[in-house]
Amino acid sequence: MRTMTPERSLSEQFPRLAHNGGVDAGELERLRLRAHRFAEEQVRPRALDIDRRAGEDPSWFDWDLVRAGGEAGMLGLLIPKPAGGGGGMATQAAVVMEELCAACPGIALIFGAHALGISPLLLGGPSQWDGVLAELVASEHTSEPQLMACAITEPEAGTDVEDPDLLRLARITSHARRVPGGFRLSGTKRFISNGSVARWITILMPTDPTAAAETWTCFLVDTRSEGFAVSRVEHKMGQRACPAAELTFDEVFVPDERIVGREGDGAAATTIVLACSRPPVAAIATGIARGAYERVLGWLREDPAAKGLLERQHVQLALAGMEEEIHLARQLYMDAATELDHTALGDAMSHPAVRALAHVPASIRGRAPVRGWLHSERTRDATVALLHRTTSERAVTRSLALSSMAKARGGDVAMRVTGAALELAGLRAGPVRAELEKLWRDAKLTQIYEGTNQLNRIEVYRGLCQAGTIQCLPPLRRIHPDTDNNAPANANARGHASANGNGGRS
Amino acid sequence: MSTTSLAERAEIRALARELASRELTPRAAALDAGGQDALHECWRLLVELGLDRALLDEQHAGAGLGIAELLATIEELAVGDAGIAMSVLLCNTALATLAGEQLAGVAAGTRWTLAPAAPGTELTLSDGRCDGRIACALGAYDADGLVILLDGPAPLAWTLDVSAGGCEIERDLAQMGLRAAPAASIEATGVSCVPALDGSNGGSAALGVADVLALLRAGTAAIAHGITRRAHEMALEYAHARHQGGVAIIEHDAVSDMLSAMAVRLACWPQPAAAPAGLATERAHALAAKITATDAAVASTTDAVQVFGGTGYMVETGIEKLMRDAKYCQLFPEPNWVAHDQLMRSQRSGRAA
């Protein structure tokens, strides 16, 4: 049974796409078809086998699939065009995720976790284009593609670290210690998707453990660094194709130029990254639900063992309910993604200054003086200032709320639809049962990762019911004439962030 | 009917509870991983207590329990491992169908199972020969004996010679839940089979096929309730121990609401065999109890994993296993939507399901 293609194009389903400056609806449709083809030809045929192998040995990993994904353009999707990538944002990532997850959520998560690892670098602006991002693109079509991961969760702090308020009370045990020329990172990060296979990891740690929220900072870590170790790979209930690892950092050195953004901006960066990553996670959940629906419908239509069931009103009502839930889940994640891309962050990404830098050849951007300027404290401050000029904390808060709503609803839909599909088929359904059971196991994770559904609904309350504003943009700072003094940033800088409460649009 | 006194019932239940806590819970992960050694060891312990033939009388080396005691025992075992509890249920229902002379030939300590099947679509029986295929028959892998229960307008129970030529039993490697009742597909080509069910084996009430199905459903409900209890215990303990946002997570409404919902589901347990108001009532009640208890188990185990968060999604904690076991209870002996249908069919026709 092959998956079905929708009767309506994306622009017909989502008229707002036509008015979304950042997204070309035709290009998006072509991307969706490309992802669909990759999913059908490469992902789905391997899904059960990979799930079984990784179930027996959690560290087992299918690099061939990653290479195939690289060939299909699934790795560089979010990397900015000046760095050689696809230049996609949340909408593109979400559309691709739904297609891949209808085939296999675990395999899709490899590409999703890679994108999550890249996300903080996008906030770093043009300074990040010519380093690791370019290296990732260069590796995409080679026999050794590089993967990324993002490490936030700690053994004693899971939900805590994804919420700026809870972060202040969290039991953070990791620590980035200032040393000449950079930082030394120590601690443990847990449940890190792609953690055991990633070449690069964006990681969040405090530079002052007594003020974790204020000094939460994003670093880019080379996993070949001394002191880095994969301490275990978890045996998961589902989504097994993508390994979740515990990572140990023992005085791992990270040079100054691999601080992503500025010291102390990590909490704001996390909030924005979550606003960006939750629509694709909602799409993951929607894809899982769709995969289960398509499989059970195919079974009901084609398997002699299911003869007559489609004539039963109960079955018809159950299928209609699934279709309804999937449709609503897709509307929610597309709304959240386009809101983010168009309203919350779109202007920053397409700002004339950014576009102008994109026209500067990489060979010139790579020259020492230009490179030094791009990584200077002044440029980092200017990047933050640009963010303040192009968006507001209220816009990002609202966007985060919509993303969280889509994510929470999507996770619930995935559980309900996979559960209902499995119940329709029952234990006697033959080979399709194994696929449905896998999707049901896979679905549960969508209610947990990227913040539990409960935490996501608190975000909905804050952003929509309360119409509140989270301090989610890094603070504005006076731009110093001395640009490269490597002085530690003011640990209390967040205290006077966005004093105008409107995200510093002044 | 059972002749056990209240004190004896309490003692049996306490023994089962202790066995579950001391022997089954520590082996649950190994059983879930498909370890045959762990399964054989657990089975040996169950046989020592006579739980493999709990419904049979002393004459047949049974424990002489009544249905209510068996269900209570199974519930306790399910708190330790639901797959083992299912194996006990299946063995007891299978043996309860056997005629006296068949029973005499069943060796001590052997594990039997019972596989419900749809006549026509799955299996056909003709002239003492059986043809067809049953997928995912719980407990059938490595079982010493097999009873097929054909649930149709005229329900039938037959014993199938599993060692006969033409009978292929292949382990179901995809089995997601209740893995200590190892499932297999059964492919029969002209395999000889013998009618069972004469109801003369004593110990329990005389069981017709419909009664056996009711017992299977009531037993599944008891297993589901055991799973729900275990999920609640584990989630509650974790909610006290785990801190987020500077407090134990039980202090967060988001978590305590889920724990409260679990407690409510436990309080609403319908006790399938509690009302001996005649078999017709019991059969319908067993269906209703199975639906209610298994839906509750799925809801509570799903919530329990949510309480654990990312930790709960990891196999080593043992909480996600409860979710998988609960889901299988919802699908056995039939999916709950079919159980609803059966319930209403009996209402429509005015006869027992």
Image (cartoon, rainbow, N blue to C red):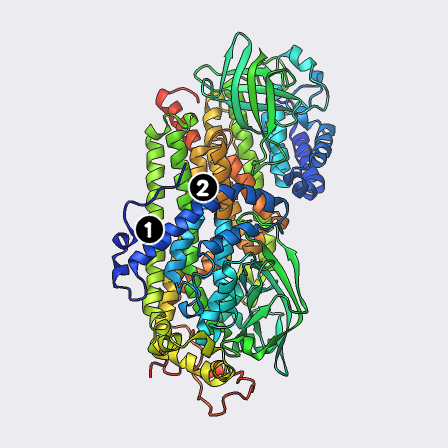
Give the residue pinned by disc 2.
A419
How far apart are labels 1 and 2 at the CA level?
Answer: 18 Å
**From the viewer's perspective, is residue B161 above or below residue A33?**
above
Name the foreground residue: A441 vs A116. A116
- Give the x, y percent position of residue A503: 37, 78
| Quadrant assignment, res A324 | top left
Q: Percent from the top left, x then y, of residue A111?
A: 49, 56
Query: What percent of the width, then of the height, locates residue A140?
Result: 50, 60
Residue B308 place in picture, x, y as percent = 56, 54
Q: Quadrant of residue B246?
A: bottom right
Residue depicted at x 36% and y 38%: A318
Q: Is residue A444 visible?
A: no
Whether residue A198 is visible to the viewer of this picture, yes or no, is: yes
Q: Kindly give the residue lying farthest to the top in the view shown.
A: B127
Provide the chain ID for the residue under circle 2.
A
Q: Is residue A492 above or below residue A247?
A: below
| Mark 1 Cα shell of 10 Å, populated few (<14), some (14-19), many (≥20) | some
Q: What kind of element bears circle 1?
A: helix
Q: In which quadrant is the N terminus of chain A drawn?
A: top left
**B57 sits to left or right of A22:** right
**A143 or A186: nearer the eye?**
A143
- Element type where label 2 sits in the image: helix
- Marks 1 and 2: CB-CB under 8 Å? no
Mark identifier at residue A328 = 1
Residue B208 badge: none
Give the left or right position of residue A387, taking residue B236 as reference.
left
- What is the chain letter for disc 1? A
Q: Earlier in the sequence, mark 1 or mark 2?
A: 1
